[in-house]
Image (spheres, helix red, strand yellow):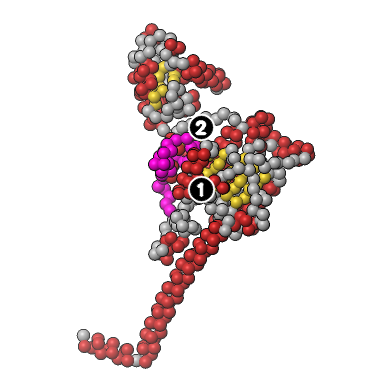
Amino acid sequence: MTSVLDRLSRAFGDTRVQLATTALAASALTAGAMWGTQRKRRNKRARDLKRRTLEMVDFDSDHLLDPDPLSDKVTKATPVELTPNEESLVQEQLARHYAFLGTEGMARVRDSFVVVVGAGGVGSWAAMMLVRSGVQRIRIIDFDQVTLSSLNRHVAATRSSVGTSKVEALKASFLDIAPHVQVDARVALFSADNAAELLDGSPDFVLDCIDNMDTKLALLLHCHQHGIRVISAMGAGMKSDPSRVQLADIGNTFEDPMSRAVRRRLKSLGVISGIQVVYSAEKPGRVQLVSLADSQKEEPGDFSVLPDFRVRIVPVLGTMPAMFGIAMATHVVTELAQFPTEPLAIKGRHALYTRLQRDLGNREKDIPQENGGPQLRMSADDCGYVLEEIWRGKSAISGATDKLALTRWRRDRPMTTSNCVCMTKTEADTHDKLKGPLEEHYTPEVISFVESRFDEERHLSSMR
């Protein structure tokens, strides 16, 4: 031990060793100081950027784009003036939509005023397809700018537009496609405080394409309370299965965490249903949020875009926001044109179809043989077809979507897809016990509705 200490003492007594040790220590101290300084500078830059963004939003930066803040304001009453030649061009541009929706339907679309809140991956595609579909008055609202990461999903994002306002980038694209369209581009952050101002002008439809929960709820609640038709986009991030994208009432969503959170928060505010949403029924869990860097963990709030906005990055497959936005735009256009569509309440529920088949088989056992029973030649997929395609996932009697069952409509006729009706289990139990003509038990409206669906099914079956 003594010899080891002697050797160490002689080594550290060497001038060269002392100089090397001093240099290493100084380098370590310098590196630590530089790392600490850089971290403080990054945090300060993040705080300064957030402060400048907030100051710009508070000043209402869309006013900076035009000295007269009302000069570009668009409302339902904003005139759209076209020369005969321009109208001819527009008619040709929209020829396929005129063929699909008809003259009256397209007149309603072109006469509408739509507001899109959120001009990111979902909102930009929704707004673009509304303009391409004939909407002539549109307001787009977003506080954010185009970034390089926007290029994988934003419909108008280009290398040259990086750093510019998302809404201004969209406006430029819109006017290249349809110069007559009246575009109200608002660089603004939506909130409960400015909801009345940003949603004024009597919009025919509002599209919620916001990804912040509190802001989304403020918009949906305002629309619900003021009777404004609205459709909301749920989470398109971390999703990849296009077959799972659904359009449904918020009360009928499943699997999607954002839909569940919005549904619960709305319920606490007294809103249970009545808001259409686009969401994905894809089971979550395969992709996770990007983790924070070590330098961000101490003060994560300093790295959010704005207070109360998420810090961690959501992985996004660029095609999925586009699908959400196009689905929203399609729903809005058909609603504006009064073109009837009936979105399925839920898809992808084979276990339910199997249960319906089993329950239907038990009900068929009670049909007397002289009335063609018991008889069941329907597979689980057939039961799914009857539920989803004929009855759109709803009870023919009450329109309910929970605890459904299938049963024979007229007991004296064979069990076919044209004589199989969807009801709640309670309604089906009561129906199976009815005696005499159905017209004595149901209103003419119910009878007519059910028979019209069977007529539709017979017509479609003849074409297969």
Q: Which residue of the protein is positioned furthest toward the left in this rendering?
A: 1
Which quadrant of the figure contains the N terminus? bottom left
Q: Which region of the structure is painted magenta?
A: 261-289
- Seen from the viewer's position, the closer of residues 151 and 441 is 441
**Residue under circle 1?**
210
Image quarter for residue 15?
bottom left
Q: Helix, strand, or loop for circle 2?
A: loop
Q: How many marks?
A: 2
- Seen from the viewer's position, the closer of residues 35 and 439 is 439
Instruction: Locate residue 343 relative to residue 291 in the image: left or right.
Output: right
Q: Position of residue 67 (x, y in %)?
A: 67, 57
Q: Are marks 1 and 2 in contact (CB under 8 Å)?
A: no
The answer to if 417 sits in the magenta stretch is: no
Mark 1 belongs to which amino acid?
Ile
Instruction: Locate residue 47 relative to residue 166 in the image: left or right.
Output: left
- Seen from the viewer's position, the closer of residues 303 and 350 is 303
Mark 2 belongs to which amino acid?
Pro
